[in-house]
Amino acid sequence: MSLTIDRRQVLKGTVGLLVAGNALGYSSAFASGKFTQLDIDTHVIEVNGKAAKVYSLLQPNGKSGLETKAGANFKVTLKNHLGYDSLVHWHGLTPPSNQDGVPELSQPPLAAGKTYMYDFFLERPGTHWMHSHVGLQEQKMLAAPLIIHDPAEVNLDEQNVVIMLHDFTFKEPEEILAKLRSGEGDMEEGMPMKGGMAMKDGMPMKDGMPMNGGMDMDMDLNDVEFDAYLANDRTLSDPDVVRVDPGAKVRLRIINAAASTNFMIDLGTLEGAVIAVDGHNVMSVAGKRFEIAIAQRVDIRLTVPAGQGAYPILAVREGDVERTGIYLATASGSVKKLGDKGDYEAPPIRMGLEQRLTAATPLAVKPADRSLTLNLTGNMMRYIWTLNDRVYEDRIPLMVSKGERVEIALQNKTGMAHPMHLHGHVFQVVAINNKPINGAIRDTVMVPPMTRMTIAFDANNPGRWAFHCHNLYHMASGMFTSLEYEV
């Protein structure tokens, strides 16, 4: 079996039909010793009055995604009902390398009509998700929740509410990518994009001159315009309404499954506290608004007010007024539908929340055995995104050895933020711009423009692992490398 992959393989398999319908639902914990079937397929949803065929990841009973508990084996039979290749990555889990779901790097694509069986131990609970790693299928919503419960919380008096966010387009994602590469998208030579600023030769510009990291910069925020933003497959014109009891405790499990959009979570009149990110507990951070980058998850605990009422939980697009969301509503709470544009523009998502997060269970203190630097690079005008100035097929893998404590400095030299995701491991954010912090345990960290984020992890899962920007169009344009273990 070939273990090489090029960008053509990364882009292979998207035929453009779409997804996942009805209200989200989840299975009960896996039956002991039995496999749960998960089907890759398509079905139709309605977005702003128009039908759209989208991908789905469903159990035979029609429930989307999977729900189980830590301390058991992840036993899944994945069947591809599409007429072309697909494959699913278990985002946030740390399986053996050959079950990680990246075409060729970890396993071959799953051919039409074929089945893979997965069987590995689930050590940690958390809010995770699953998505295709073939082509641009993720943009067409080939994704679903993956919730791993903590057995110690089985009797906790708390209602779990999953909110899965998407950016939606009626266009084919290949068309979007082609326009970005041709310069026919939302940006022309020397002109800013929506919410952004001019770029040239991959550098931010002001008054025709390059800007450096020490200046106040209005960087580019969004390079793709979408037709709608969805929460649990719905817009705010027809929102998902979750019934709750007055005075009830609620745990929001929010998953940013968008291909190219960061959001600001807005609790409106409610107060909440972040208790976990990317499936890992943090020291409680209270507030009403919280950042969530592409591919990240945030768990927020709140208490529903006494009495009857309806409470919108909103996700506002970074640098814009466009939004989506759901409602928490009591039995007779009156739901007032909101427009898909709000009354304020969400600010750029930088490090406001990240700097406030502290891991509840940090890594053991020890010096790094290996320190690496990964420069986030690219050329906006040609729409080529790179790591250490190399696209995937020309990459030089990051090498580690089993048992090492590894630190990687992620130095963003571009005018866009990049949510960087490491497969097969969890890491701790240990420094921002060289200032040490005791940050969150994560699997995806957003690196703002001209910023240096340092992560640390224990090299305890040998294999060949993907490490990439989770903005789908950046990844498909080359911002993808591998982390590999020395033999």
Image (spheres, rainbow, N blue to C red):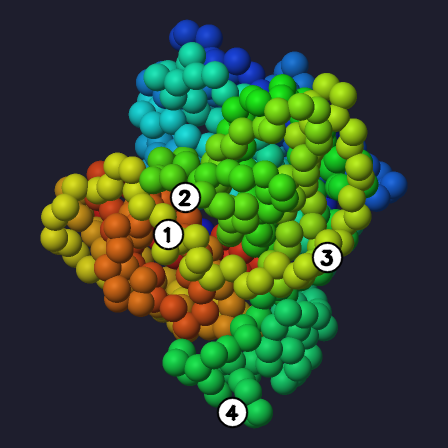
Q: Residues within 10 Å of mark 2 (few under 14, many from 20)?
A: some
Residue type indicated by callout 2: Val
The disc label shown at residue 285, or none? 2
Q: Is residue 405 above or below residue 118?
A: below
- Marks 1/4 in contact by CB < 8 Å: the verdict is no
Q: Left or right: where does residue 334 sit relative to residue 149?
A: right
Residue type indicated by callout 3: Asp
Residue type indicated by callout 4: Met
| Residue position for label 3 | 343
The disc label shown at residue 37, or none? none
For marks 2 and 1, the one nearer the N-term is 2
For marks 2 and 4, the one nearer the N-term is 4
Mark 4 secondary-structure assignment: strand
The disc label shown at residue 356, or none? 1
Could you tell me if residue 408 is visible in this image?
A: no
- Marks 2/1 in contact by CB < 8 Å: the verdict is yes
Q: Where in the figure is residue 268, as x and y percent of width and height?
A: 63, 44
How many marks overall?
A: 4
The disc label shown at residue 209, or none? 4
Mark 3 secondary-structure assignment: loop
Q: Residue at x 58, y 66 (%)?
A: 221
Residue type indicated by callout 1: Arg
Q: CA distance from mark 3 to mark 2?
A: 25 Å
